[in-house]
Amino acid sequence: MSSIPRHKVFVSYHHQNDQGYRNRFERLFSDVYDIMDSRSVRIGSIPDGLRIDEISRLIRDDYLSDSTVTVVLIGTDTWRRKHIDWEVAATVRDTTANRRSGLVGIFLPTHPSYGDDDYDPYTIPPRLHYNVECGFADLYDWSESATDVAAWIHGAYSKRRTVNPDNGSVRFRKNWGGPRWYPQRRGG
């Protein structure tokens, strides 16, 4: 594990449902095992009432611009959240000011697909799913193994320049409802 370098990691997650897992992930892998530097948004860091474009800009410019990998913690309702969609979109976007980061999804024990070989693609964030399909991102089950997580993060970091991501989904304007999402892509 010591041969794998530390990476600057942005953790994307459903704040209301999965805060405990995010706290444990960062405590284990930033503090205890020291395999990553966290670049995550903290609760209250983004003021309420901002326009969508302003929130997206803050996330992209103040948090994601300094990260090299985004880890999406996938709980039962993660796929519904507009902020997670925006964070994944900013992660895979490559501009002069904000270089593309690697992307990895980790199923939490609360997700119905945790521990299964297959997953229902309509119960994970759509943009993450499309990036798994094109080979840009990978999915794993929650682990507290520093060796495993370090390898996952480094694998995502390594792919960020060698595999083209898919950023063709329509951007969420609001959180989604229902039991699952449905395909909605930009035309052309």
Image (spheres, rainbow, N blue to C red):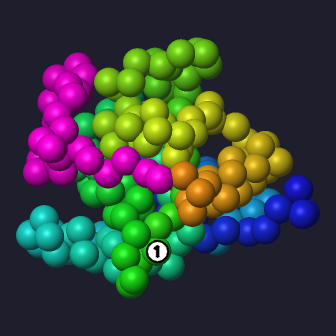
Task: Give percent across and percent down for residue 144.
Answer: 73, 42
149 inside magenta stretch = no
Assign the C terminus to one quadrant of the image. top left
Picture layout, residue 27 above or below residue 60: above
Residue 88 shown left or right of residue 80 in the figure: right
Amino acid marked by disc 1: Arg
185 inside magenta stretch = yes
**79 or 31, which lies in front?**
79
Residue 184 appears anywhere in the view = yes
Task: Give percent across and percent down for residue 76.
Answer: 38, 29
Residue 18 appears anywhere in the view = no
Element assignment for label 1: loop
Picture layout, residue 125 above or below residue 97: above
Q: Which residues are magenta?
A: 164-188
Residue 103 shown left or right of residue 165 in the figure: right
At 53% across and 16% down in the image, what residue appears?
Answer: 118
Residue 162 shown left or right of residue 122 in the figure: right
Residue 152 shown left or right of residue 61 in the figure: right
**165 or 118, which lies in front?**
165
At 40% across and 69% down in the image, what residue appears?
Answer: 94
Residues packed near mark 1 inside 10 Å, few (<14), some (14 to 19) or many (20 plus): some
* Residue position for label 1: 99
- Residue found at the far front of this picture: 188
**35 or 64, which lies in front?**
64
At 28% across and 77% down in the image, what residue appears?
Answer: 58
- Residue found at the far right of this picture: 2
Task: Give percent across and percent down for residue 98.
Answer: 41, 78
Q: Please, what is the dominant secondary structure of the magenta stretch?
A: loop
